[in-house]
Amino acid sequence: MITWSKSSYSNGEGGDCVEIGEGIPDLVPVRDSKDPDGPQLVFSTAGWTAFLAAVKNDEF
């Protein structure tokens, strides 16, 4: 079972948010919080960690 968590940057007013899923070993599912039944992206844990590091380092 996946447990979904909203981004810490969520404004609580229905703004643009992503949710990440927990509960699948070695994978990080990501979805749009406004469309929980919509498509999901699935990243490896290593890939997700590298993506977050790149965002934090302003590489985009």
Image (tube, grey):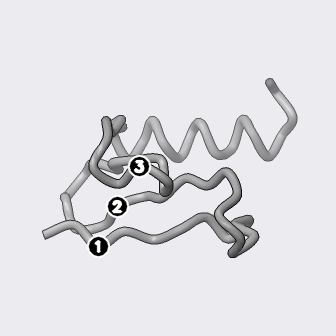
The residue tagged 1 is 3
Q: What distance separates the C-alpha of mark 3 from that of mark 1?
A: 16 Å
Q: Quadrant of residue 21?
A: bottom left
- Amino acid type for the residue under numbered disc 2: Gly
At mark 1, the secondary structure is strand
- Does 49 appear above or below 58? below
| Distance from Cα at disc 1 to Cα at disc 2 | 5 Å
At horizontal 19% and vertical 59% (from top left) the residue drawn is 24
User: For the view shown, which residue lies furthest in the left direction?
Assistant: 1
With 36 as the anchor, is 18 left or right in this view? Answer: right
- Ranked by sequence position, the earlier of labels 1 and 2 is 1
Question: In this rendering, is residue 33 above or below 27?
Answer: below
Lateral position of residue 16 relative to residue 46, left or right: right
Which of the two marks, 3 or 2, is nearer to us in this view?
Answer: 3
Image spot of residue 19 (x, y percent): 48, 58
In the rendered view of the protein, which quadrant contains the N terminus?
bottom left
Q: Are marks 1 and 2 in contact (CB under 8 Å)?
A: yes
Q: Who is closer to the viewer here, 54 or 41?
A: 41
Report crowding for label 3: few under 14, some 14 to 19, many 20 or more residues within 10 A (C-alpha): few
Give the alpha-carbon distance from disc 3 to disc 2, as whole Å.
Answer: 14 Å
| Kind of residue indicated by mark 1 | Thr
Seen in the picture, residue 22 relative to 20 is either above or below; the reply is below
Q: Which residue is mark 2?
A: 21
Q: Indicate the quadrant containing the C terminus: top left, top right, bottom left or bottom right.
A: top right
The residue that disc 3 covers is 35
Q: Quadrant of residue 23?
A: bottom left
Image location (x, y in percent) of residue 22? 31, 66
Q: Give how far across and how far down residue 33 sits, in percent.
A: 48, 57
Residue at 64 percent of width and 45 percent of height:
52
Residue 20 tag number: none
Residue depicted at 41% across the width and 47% down the height: 30
Q: Residue at x 70, y 57 (%)?
A: 15
